Image (cartoon, rainbow, N blue to C red):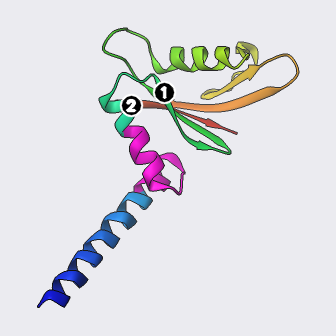
């Protein structure tokens, strides 16, 4: 009887981990379910403006709105890029593909927003 419980618990944990991985890949295109899960929890339940869920290529999740301000995810992206020394190049924007430059290099960011968060994916 004890062995059956252990097998059932292991199967349940495996199904939960598999489901979290599928969600992470579908929503963020990130294979690490822990990174995307903790990133989403940080954005939804804390006052953090953004969190990095993957470093190469960069995938950053921005807060849609914080309780203390009326900033949008796009404004958080602008501030984040400004802190890295980049400025927005509106002439090169192609729909949701935003272009930022620091003078010597350009970064292309596919930016999207939904009800809960904004997401920037570096191309």
Which residue was labeled with disc 1? 50
Say whether residue 99 is magenta. no
Taking the spot 60% from the left edge, 15% from the top edge, the residue there is 78
Residue 54: image quadrant is top right
The reply to whether dot 2 and dot 1 touch (C-beta < 8 Å) is yes
Q: Is residue 106 left or right of residue 19?
A: right
Taking the spot 42% from the left edge, 25% from the top edge, the residue there is 63
Q: Which residues are magenta?
A: 23-40
Taking the spot 80% from the left edge, 17% from the top edge, the residue there is 102
Taking the spot 68% from the left edge, 45% from the top edge, the residue there is 56
Residue 4: image quadrant is bottom left
3D distance between C-alphas at marks 2 and 1:
7 Å
Q: Nearer the viewer, residue 51 or 91?
A: 51
Q: How many marks?
A: 2
Residue 88 x, y percent position in the rendering:
69, 15
Outermost residue toward the top in this view: 69
Query: Which is more N-terminal, label 1 or label 2?
Result: 2
Residue 117 x, y percent position in the rendering:
41, 30
Outermost residue toward the right in this view: 104
Residue 47: image quadrant is top left
Residue 17 x, y percent position in the rendering:
37, 64
Q: Quadrant of the C terminus?
A: top right
Which residue was labeled with disc 2? 43
Count neighbours of disc 2 (C-alpha within 10 A) and say few if under 14, some if 14 to 19, many if 20 or more: many
Q: Is residue 55 left or right of residue 85?
A: left
Q: Is residue 81 above or below residue 37?
A: above
| Residue 69 in sight from this viewpoint | yes
Count neighbours of disc 1 (C-alpha within 10 A) and say few if under 14, some if 14 to 19, many if 20 or more: many
Q: Is residue 87 above or below residue 10?
A: above
Say whether residue 38 is magenta. yes
């Amino acid at each position: 009887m004890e062995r059956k419980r252990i097998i059932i618990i292991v199967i349940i944990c495996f199904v939960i981990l598999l489901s979290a991985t599928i969600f992470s890949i579908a929503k963020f295109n990130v294979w690490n379910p822990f990174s995307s899960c903790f990133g989403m929890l940080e954005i939804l339940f804390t006052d953090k403006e953004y969190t990095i869920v993957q470093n190469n290529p960069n995938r950053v999740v921005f807060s849609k709105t914080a309780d203390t301000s009326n900033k949008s995810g796009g404004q958080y992206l602008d501030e984040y890029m400004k802190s890295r020394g980049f400025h927005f190049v509106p002439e090169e924007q192609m729909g949701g593909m935003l272009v930022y430059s620091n003078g010597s290099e350009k970064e292309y960011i596919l930016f999207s927003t939904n009800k809960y968060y904004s997401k920037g994916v570096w191309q």
